[in-house]
Amino acid sequence: MMMRRCSLVSLSRKQASLRLGLFIGQNQSLVTASAKQVPETQKSVKPKEGVKSLNVEKDVWLKMQEEARVDVTKEPLLSTYYNTSILSHTSLQTALANHLAVKLATATLPSGALSALFAAVLESDEDVMDAVKSDLRAVKERDPACVTHVHCFLNFKGFLACQAHRLAHKLWLQGRKVVAVTIQNRVSEVFAVDIHPGAEIGSGILLDHATGIVVGETAVIGNNVSILHGVTLGGTGKVSGDRHPKIGDGVLIGAGTCILGNIRIGDGAKIGAGSVVIKDVPPRTTVVGNPAKLVGGKNNPLKLDNIPSFTMDHTSHISDFYDYYCFAPFKTGCNKNKKSQLVQSSTPNNAKHKMIKIRWIVSRQKKIRWITAVSTESTILAYFRILPDVVMVFSLRLIR
């Protein structure tokens, strides 16, 4: 009976193809053949959401437990500490909640209450946990001082301060601002990191050393950003509202940097150590100095090929920026008539002299004077006329 039904169905298809024409029938056969050529196992299947993140979390947590067991084997003295912090927990959420609670607890702010509060936030928000794992990987990959993931988890205060901020920020968004500010205060006291709970921070963050980092309320930090110690993302005064910097993705901020005001640091930019930035920085450029200036100039700034927060290269292009002339000890009171003698005695016989003009500002007279200098491959002799019959001689050495 089943075979008869199949034959009837096939017959009706043939009749339909004859009625509609040979061309349509051929197209239908081609479509059918092409569909049969693709096996079911080779068809693309969209992965279920959350599977990848769960696998990554499991891998990180299992790796941390393995690293903890190895450390305990090497240092039995730390067995109780590692067991309480890592090995006695069943998940990364509870381990992190407990570890932060122990660090931030006081006599009047018990660790048990903090641990329960932190665990509730971590277990209810997958985005926060994804950011935690991304931060762990960022520290392990970018900081050569980080030996293992568990080493970062237990001992790196930059990582711990960042995770405490994530919890405080979540509570801030929930309207629990009093608790959020309390956590911020404890983080500042314990880790010397002051991040307002209203600030927004992306994932893959490295706070290297972290001591003295200050981030204002309306600041925004993108993904995969590396920040060193002593960095301030602050305002310019008493201006209220949106008043703090916006940091793009992949930015590297050197130690001791101040970025002030509601300005934008473009994606992939690099801020040299000790800089004071008060204007927007274009993407993939480098600024350094006080006030910060673009390396390569404003009109044609040097563009970075790699993401600086990943390479953690603080000196490339910046060191080239400082390859200027430096002043060597100079002679005064030289008569201008002896200029040729000084030049001849101070330069090689076979050196190719190049006459150039440079501009010199006399500080006392506030005048711009044009003078002549003699240049060789390694030195420049400059003659500055300070009196009608007196010439000051500077020997400038080119740094290579």
Image (cartoon, rainbow, N blue to C red):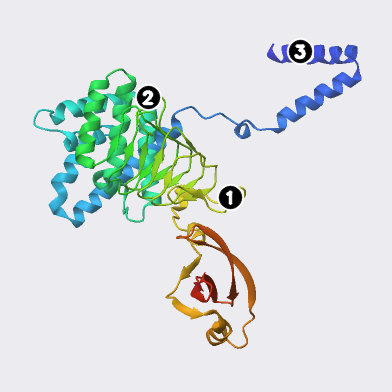
**Mark whose residue sits in front, 1 or 2:** 2
Viewer-closest of 108 and 359: 359
Going by the numbered disc 3, the residue's amino acid type is Val
Secondary structure, mark 3, is: helix
Q: CA distance from mark 3 to mark 1?
A: 72 Å
Which is nearer the N-term, disc 1 or disc 2?
A: 2
**Mark whose residue sits in front, 3 or 1:** 1
Check disc 1 and report the residue beneath it: 301
Check disc 2 and report the residue beneath it: 240
| Res 283 visible | yes
**Residue drawn at (44%, 78%), measured in percent from left and top?**
331
Going by the numbered disc 1, the residue's amino acid type is Pro
- Dot 1, crowdedness within 10 Å: few (<14), some or many (≥20)? some
Q: CA distance from mark 1 to mark 2?
A: 33 Å
Query: For the view shown, which residue lies furthest in the left direction?
Result: 107
Which is nearer the N-term, disc 3 or disc 1?
A: 3
Left or right of 100: which side holds 317? right
Going by the numbered disc 2, the residue's amino acid type is Ser
**Residue drawn at (65%, 33%), measured in percent from left and top?**
39
Q: CA distance from mark 2 to mark 3?
A: 76 Å
Check disc 3 and report the residue beneath it: 9
Quadrant housing residue 349: bottom right
Viewer-closest of 336 and 382: 336
Check the picture and name the quadrant holding the N terminus.
Answer: top right
Left or right of 232: which side holds 105? left
- Dot 2, crowdedness within 10 Å: few (<14), some or many (≥20)? few
